[in-house]
């Protein structure tokens, strides 16, 4: 966590990607990503749900263990899923503690900057559990917010978001995600906070950026929000590979002699 504070002080951007399994975790570690987030976006991009709400703590733990096996030396943050921390500080402590104990992750992330969320943060930090905050669009509140909409467009909303980010910092968060926040406001918040901000759809002035890995690599071509930049076209490559396999099997080109074992000892 001190490294991220130092990166902010140097003006060095923090690169964060989500990850959910061992092979991509290994690639992220080898390429030197600064931080891995095992996001509750797992619900949509891996498990096929329509929102983050259905994913369970057990599913988050299962996938985090896989990520840690692939990237054991990379700082890893885990989203606490819906209803694993909202009810009480005791629930939050129990579930965050399990997350760190059973996965080897370094920190947890929770959504919201209102007083109840800040109280959860204070309880976790007192117990020695590092916490990343999250304000702006909060996917676990998608039904209350009326969909994935930019937050903080008017002055009243902007002051609420600014106050929430400051409150999370004061509660002990080591970093705050700003999601779907106007770029000017995100830049102002980033300059005001001592801790790093990690933006997604929040402009270039945040202290770092995060994207959902399957979206960034083009595995989910039907998802095209304004903030997303695709860095690969893996869905196209996968379709092509599967087509070639089917053709080879149907035409008996695979397996060839080079893929076949003889009877010799």
Image (cartoon, rainbow, N blue to C red):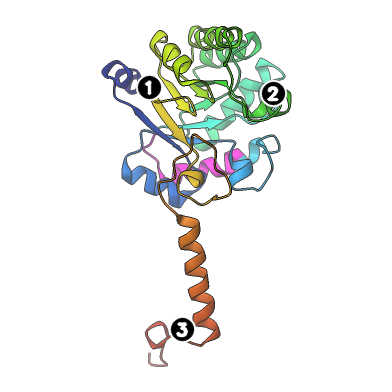
| Residue at image location 53% in from the left, 82% down from the top | 249
Residue under pointer 2: 145
Quarter of the image for residue 209 reads top left
Residue under pointer 1: 207
Note whether 251 is above or below 76 in the view shown: below
Q: Is residue 64 left or right of residue 195?
A: right
Note whether 235 is above or below 21 in the view shown: below
Magenta residues, start to end: 60-74
Tell me where residue 129 appears, x and y as whole percent: 51, 20
Quarter of the image for residue 5 reads top left
Q: Is residue 32 left or right of residue 90?
A: left
The Cα–Cα distance between marks 2 and 1, rounded to whole angstroms, is 26 Å
Q: Identify which residue, 243 or 3, lies in the foreground.
A: 243
Residue under pointer 3: 255
Label 1: element kind:
loop
Tell me where residue 229 appears, x and y as whole percent: 44, 41
Q: Is residue 54 left or right of residue 191?
A: right
| Residue at image location 45% in from the left, 33% down from the top | 210
């Amino acid at each position: 966590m001190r490294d991220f504070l130092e990166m902010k002080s140097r003006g060095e951007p923090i690169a964060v990607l989500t990850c959910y399994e061992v092979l991509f975790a290994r690639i992220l570690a080898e390429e030197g990503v600064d931080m891995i987030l095992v996001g509750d976006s797992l619900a949509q991009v891996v498990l096929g749900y329509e929102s983050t709400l259905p994913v369970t703590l057990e599913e988050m733990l299962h996938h985090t263990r896989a990520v840690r096996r692939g990237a054991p030396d990379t700082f890893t943050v885990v989203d606490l899923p819906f209803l694993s921390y909202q009810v009480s500080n005791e629930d939050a402590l129990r579930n965050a503690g399990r997350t760190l104990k059973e996965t080897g992750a370094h920190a947890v992330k929770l959504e919201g900057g209102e007083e109840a969320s800040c109280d959860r943060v204070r309880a976790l930090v007192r117990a020695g559990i590092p916490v990343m905050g999250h304000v702006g669009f909060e996917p676990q509140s998608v039904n209350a917010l009326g969909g994935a909409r930019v937050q903080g467009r008017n002055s009243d909303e902007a002051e609420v978001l600014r106050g929430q980010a400051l409150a999370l910092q004061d509660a002990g968060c080591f970093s705050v995600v700003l999601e779907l926040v106007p770029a000017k406001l995100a830049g102002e918040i980033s300059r005001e906070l001592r801790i790093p901000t990690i933006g997604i759809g929040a402009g270039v002035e945040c202290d770092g950026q995060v994207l959902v890995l399957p979206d960034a690599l083009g595995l989910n071509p039907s998802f095209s929000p304004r903030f997303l930049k695709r860095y690969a076209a893996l869905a196209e490559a996968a379709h092509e590979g599967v087509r070639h396999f089917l053709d080879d099997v149907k035409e008996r080109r695979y397996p060839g002699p080079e893929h076949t074992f003889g009877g010799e000892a």
